[in-house]
Image: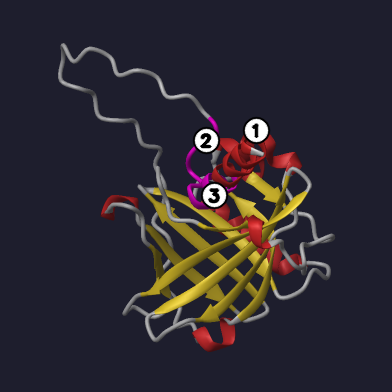
Amino acid sequence: MAEVWRSVFVAALLICASMLDPAEAVGGAKSRPRPQRRPPKKPKVEPTDAPPLAQNVDLQRMMGTWFLLITASKCSYLINHGTKVEPTVMTLARSSDHTLSVSTKTRHNHQCWEILQVYNILPTPGRLMLKGTRAELNTDIIGETDYNYAIMYYQKRGKITMKLYGRSVDNLPEPMLTKFEQLAEKQNMGLAYLFPFPTYSHCGDVDKDHVINCVPTC
């Protein structure tokens, strides 16, 4: 029994890491720090354009179910496993005047998992924040939407991941796909960094043992 729960715990950590820190590799080993004989070099940061100005989004019209259609990211996990992504659905609900309750359901090892998060509503319309364990690990979230489709920018430590959500899994209109591709290109993410998600076989009810609360830990 202990081995079973250890496996479940490890799986939960993998799911949480892949959902919450899109700019980091999942399961990568960390190397030991080198002896500090010289002043450390500044880390190389890939140039990225700033995300667009926030749209004045009516959050009440954003509540409900959204299906993840495409992700644009330089996340090493997606680059290595982008052909194996699972159908993913996000549900938004207003939990208070200042927060949104976010439920994301997806599969891992052929089992459905539900990841629960809280997005903080910022004073600037259309801007949200997912708090990390430290201020520098916060994820800024900016959205633009016509309320049928939504493009979400997730920015953390200078790196941006974009996600295109739809209210349904019907055929994605060509103009919306083109718009998403063009916006991703502005963030230095061409077609090689676009990862379509399955639009079928989404998770329904999830066993309570597969519900996890996630906050960024990296």
Circle 2 residues within 10 Å: few <14, some 14–19, many ≥20: some
The answer to whether 131 appears left or right of 86 in the picture is: left
| x 18%, y 15%: residue | 36
In this rendering, the label closer to the viewer, 2 or 3: 3
Q: Earlier in the sequence, mark 1 or mark 3?
A: 3
Q: Find out whether the residues at labels 1 and 2 contact each other: C-beta distance under 8 Å.
A: yes
Q: Nearer the viewer, residue 194 or 91?
A: 91
**Disc 2 versus disc 3: distance between alpha carbons?**
12 Å
| x 57%, y 43%: residue | 9
Circle 3 residues within 10 Å: few <14, some 14–19, many ≥20: many
| x 34%, y 75%: residue | 122
Query: Mark 2: which amino acid?
Result: Ala
In this rendering, the label closer to the viewer, 1 or 3: 3
User: Does residue 16 belong to the magenta stretch?
Assistant: yes
Which residue is denoted by mark 1 in the rendering? 80
| x 60%, y 57%: residue | 182
Q: Disc 2 on helix, strand or loop? A: loop
Q: Earlier in the sequence, mark 1 or mark 2?
A: 2
Q: Position of residue 20 (x, y in %)?
A: 50, 52
Q: Position of residue 206 (x, y in %)?
A: 72, 63
**Disc 1 versus disc 3: distance between alpha carbons?**
17 Å
Query: Measured along the vertical axis of the image, is residue 212 above or below residue 82?
Result: below
* Range shown magenta: 15-27
Question: Image quadrant of residue 63?
Answer: bottom right
Which residue is denoted by mark 3 in the rendering? 16
Query: Mark 1: which amino acid?
Result: Asn
Q: Position of residue 32 (x, y in %)?
A: 34, 17
The answer to whether 36 appears left or right of 92 in the picture is: left
Q: Earlier in the sequence, mark 2 or mark 3?
A: 3
Question: Image quadrant of residue 124?
Answer: bottom left
Which residue is denoted by mark 2 in the rendering? 25
**Disc 1 versus disc 2: distance between alpha carbons?**
9 Å
